[in-house]
């Protein structure tokens, strides 16, 4: 796990990736255990920066040319990080990265699209905490909620979350 994160397996990156995302991806790959690192390095993962409105994971099925007559498809997993991530502290941004990779691992290991089920956010957070990112997940949650209370973001849009967005308290 001494490699730079952008040299991992079949991962590709957005050439304009932000310095913050670059830094936290490096920290993420240096802190995960060897088994998880090896599993993720076998997947084709494309990491993009500056999504509008939400961080998310998407899958693209690509037909494999040598097997074209056999209809074999390979998946490319696309992790897209929302542009407001730049407003987070490095600790909270690392929590966002761990959270998104947890969604991916839940999909890979259990076939679960946790971005689109009611308990999916909690499942991803729990897995990231299991990996040792408890403080980062807590910082991530607190900072997103702070940004929402300031009217900067809408948490309902985060990760395809199905929970209703919290309403700002109106002054009477």
Image (cartoon, rainbow, N blue to C red):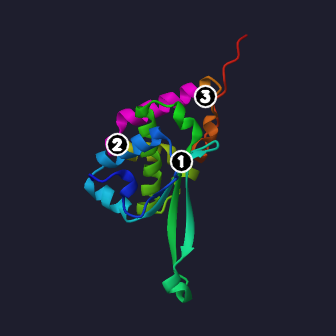
Label 2 SS:
helix
Residue depicted at x 44% and y 51% = 101
Work out how far the residue at label 1 is from the one at label 3, CA to CA, in angstroms: 26 Å
139 displayed left or right of 113: left
Q: CA distance from mark 3 to mark 2?
A: 26 Å
Lower sequence index among marks 3 and 2:
2
Image depth: mark 3 or mark 2 in front: 2
Q: Are marks 3 and 2 in contact (CB under 8 Å)?
A: no
* Residue 104 included in the magenta stretch of the image: no
Q: Position of residue 42 (x, y in %)?
A: 37, 65
Label 3: how many residues lie within 10 Å, few (<14), some (14-19) or many (20+)? some
Q: Residue furthest bottom?
A: 69
Q: Secondary structure at mark 1?
A: loop
Residue located 50% across and 41% down the image: 18
> Between disc 2 and disc 1, whose residue precedes?
1
User: Along the horizontal axis of the image, is 27 left or right of 60?
Assistant: left
| Residue at (48, 33) in percent of width and height | 141
Instruction: Give the residue number, with chain letter if any, for mark 1.
Output: 16
Front in this rendered view, residue 141 or 91:
91
Q: Nearer the viewer, mark 1 or mark 3?
A: 1
| Tag 3 secondary structure | helix
Q: Which residue is mark 3?
A: 148
Tell which circle, 1 or 3, labels the residue nearer the N-terminal end: 1
Residue 142 in the magenta stretch? The answer is yes
The residue labelled by disc 2 is 27
Cβ atoms under marks 2 and 1 closer than 8 Å: no
Q: Which residues are magenta?
A: 130-147
Near mark 2 (Cα within 10 A), the count class, few <14, some 14-19 or many ≥20, is some
């Amino acid at each position: 796990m001494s490699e730079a994160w952008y040299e991992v397996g079949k991962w590709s990156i957005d050439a304009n990736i932000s310095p913050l995302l670059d830094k936290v991806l490096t920290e993420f790959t240096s802190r995960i255990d060897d088994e998880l690192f090896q599993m993720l390095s076998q997947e084709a993962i494309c990491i993009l920066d500056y999504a509008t409105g939400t961080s998310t994971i998407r899958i693209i099925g690509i037909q494999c040319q040598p097997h074209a007559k056999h209809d074999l498809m390979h998946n490319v997993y696309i992790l897209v990080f929302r542009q407001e991530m730049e407003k987070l502290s490095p600790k909270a941004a690392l929590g966002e990265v761990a959270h998104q990779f947890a969604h991916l691992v839940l999909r890979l290991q259990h076939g679960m699209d946790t971005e689109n089920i009611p308990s999916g956010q909690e499942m991803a957070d729990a897995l990231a905490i299991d990996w040792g990112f408890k403080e980062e997940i807590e910082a991530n949650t607190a900072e997103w909620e702070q940004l929402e209370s300031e009217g900067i973001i809408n948490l309902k849009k985060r990760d395809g979350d199905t929970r209703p967005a919290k309403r700002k308290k109106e002054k009477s």
